Image (spheres, helix red, strand yellow):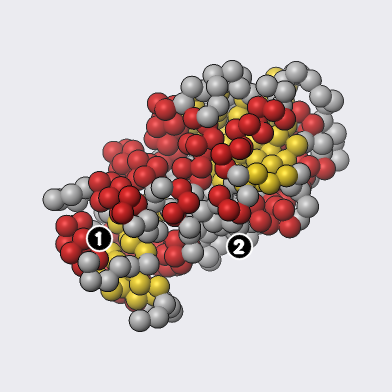
Amino acid sequence: MSGIKVMIVDDSAVVRQVLSGLLNAAAGITVTHAVANPLLAIERMKVQWPDVIVLDVEMPKMDGITFLRKIMAEHPTPVVICSTLTEKGAQTSVEALSAGAVAIITKPRLDLKQFLHDSADELVSAVRAAAGAHVGKLVNRPPPVPAPKLNADAVLPPSDHKPMTATTERVVAIGTSTGGTQALEEVLTSLPRVSPGIVVVQHMPEKFTAAFAARLDSVCEVRVKEAANNDRVLQGQVLIAPGGKHMLLRRTGAQYFVEVVDGPLVNRHRPSVDVLFRSAARAAGANALGVIMTGMGDDGAAGMLEMFKAGARTVAQDEASCVVYGMPKEAVKRGGVEKSVPLNAIYREILQQLGY
């Protein structure tokens, strides 16, 4: 059998039926099995192992996270989480991302069948992106295809303004997507409590970033929180851009703060790494370090070049350690990356290049 072989694991018969129809209708994708719980999935996988698993997280007999951890320990396989969007579901899905899932598709409790049909392009894109992910290296949300691809001009126009010369205030801007939840955890848990202020865009749906930030905060020495408008950028603190909002770095005197705003999708994302990086180039210039990590697409590549031209230091995660070498590759290609390093060396770059 050629193409991408997909297994669906969801206790809803409606979800299994609709997802199977949508994925089977897509070129190069075949649903080999659609089962109601992980125990049935394990039996089917003894006969044929899928290329991608589409997995719910709240199921009988064995929950999705336990199943995911079992799969990642025994036979790392790309997993797309298809989860109900509730506060509980958000927390559970963040745990699933930490356990090795590569993408999230949110589903509502009401009008589920219509939602799945409306999200067909997103679902197909998620499966295709997952099929190309290197999940074994870490034991995008994919872009909505119909949306026009805007650049950072849609939120923050370019400027010839030169930021202030170097000061003792430093800031790190990080952008990442597919595979980034685990990559960020590795970087941030390696940082000591006394670290430069950090602002992060991780491509993630609305409602999930608060749970993601809370989880990181529980395992890191630095404080991690979902950013709110006008939050100060402080030593020892990491601000995660809220899903569904853009985050910009601003400066007043020698102090940095973030502005959280609405706006159109930029590079088909909101939050967008390009928007954050452009604002960092304008507000911080040589006082900043830009870091671009694992992710599909090219969001952040243009902004990193702007940071580099403004005097900032710039670092990319290297290909060997990326789950998806898309965003860093494009940033390197455009000439905005000063150096590429393995994931386990990024925390040292953050501390060394900013004088910590």
Residue 78 location, x and y as percent?
40, 59
Q: Position of residue 204 (x, y in %)?
A: 47, 46
Q: What's the residue type where badge 1 is placed?
A: Val
Amino acid identity at mark 2 = Pro
User: 283 or 325: nearer the eye?
Assistant: 325
Q: Quadrant of the C terminus?
A: top right
Determine the secondary structure under disc 1. strand
Q: Residue at x 54, y 35 (%)?
A: 187
Image quadrant holding the N terminus, namely bottom left
Q: Which mark is residue 9?
A: 1
Position in image of residue 113 (x %, y %): 28, 64
Give the answer, above or below, for where 280 lies relative to 99: above
Mark 2: which secondary structure?
Answer: loop
In the current view of this chain or complex, which residue is farthest to the front? 74
Residue count near mark 2 (Cα–Cα under 10 Å), binned few <14, some 14–19, many ≥20: few
What residue is drawn where x is 63% and y is 31%?
348
Q: Which residue is mark 2?
A: 148
Q: Inspect this view and state whether residue 54 appears.
A: yes
Please indicate whether residue 117 sits to the left or right of residue 252 in the image.
left
Residue lying at 75% horizontally and 37% vertically, measured from the top left: 313
